[in-house]
Amino acid sequence: MSCSLADMEITTSQNGNSSLLWFFRDRGFDDNAIHEMFRKCKRLQGTQRDRASENWAYLKTVGIHERKIPSIISKCPKILTLDLNEKLIPMVECLTTLGSKPHEVASAITKFPHILSHSVEEKLCPLLAFFQALGVPEKQLGRILLLNPRLVSYSIDSKLTEFVDFLASLGLTKDGMIGKVLVKHPFIMGYGVEKRLRPTSEFLKSVGLTELDLRTVVLNFPEVLCRDVDKDSETQFCISK
């Protein structure tokens, strides 16, 4: 559903925030994009233009190209509503300590802008501690998170714990085994256990892999578990051989 500039002006002026509408217009957003951002993030209605401008400028200081910022904000307009000193800077500084290369933090934010909307204390720190407990070396923690920043949005109590329990059921119970899998292929945690990982493991066993064989495959080539064997005939052929 489209929304004209006039409609947006009426809506935002009624809420005392027409200046933010023009903030977006000045940066090249069209009417539909602006309407969609206000729909996604109700907090924009109460956000001052000064804060939005400050946060926009801050993204440039962390190495994000200005041409990429509109896409980032479109995906996560909440970034413009956050307190710079209490939310954005602490998260970026924490991510910076995890990275080994200057561009890694900017790349992670570009891939998954919502990472900036999460809390360092409530989400990032517990997640890092969870990975360490699984045997992920401290030096590899940053690589996992910056390569797959979407991890910060996953629930430890449900999604990640279910994933760990699944790997343990395959016999990957010795110290550090699961950590090695995560380091090799961080994206494996994004796949559902029942929808993808378990069916693929069952297929592998059905073509003759023993439990030991399966553990070896998962440890060395964890990406194999992510393949959809119902659709991927190439995987079926290679594994069957």
Image (cartoon, helix red, strand yellow):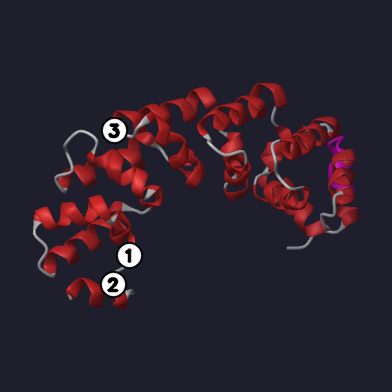
User: Upstream in the sequence, badge 1 or badge 3?
Assistant: 3
Within-10-Å neighbours for mark 2: few <14, some 14–19, many 20+: some
User: Upstream in the sequence, badge 3 or badge 2?
Assistant: 3
| Region rendered in magenta | 9-17
| Residue 166: % across, % down | 22, 46
Q: Amino acid at mark 2?
A: Thr
| Residue 47: % across, % down | 78, 33
Residue 231 placement, left or right of 111 = left
The secondary structure that most of the magenta stretch takes on is helix
Q: CA distance from mark 2 to mark 1?
A: 7 Å
Q: CA distance from mark 1 to mark 3?
A: 25 Å
Residue 135 is tagged as 3
Q: Are marks 2 and 1 in contact (CB under 8 Å)?
A: yes
| Residue 241: % across, % down | 18, 76
**Which residue is tagged 1?**
227
Residue 235 is tagged as 2
Q: Amino acid at mark 1?
A: Arg
Q: SS of the residue at dot 3?
A: loop
Write the residue at 60% across / 35% down. Answer: 117
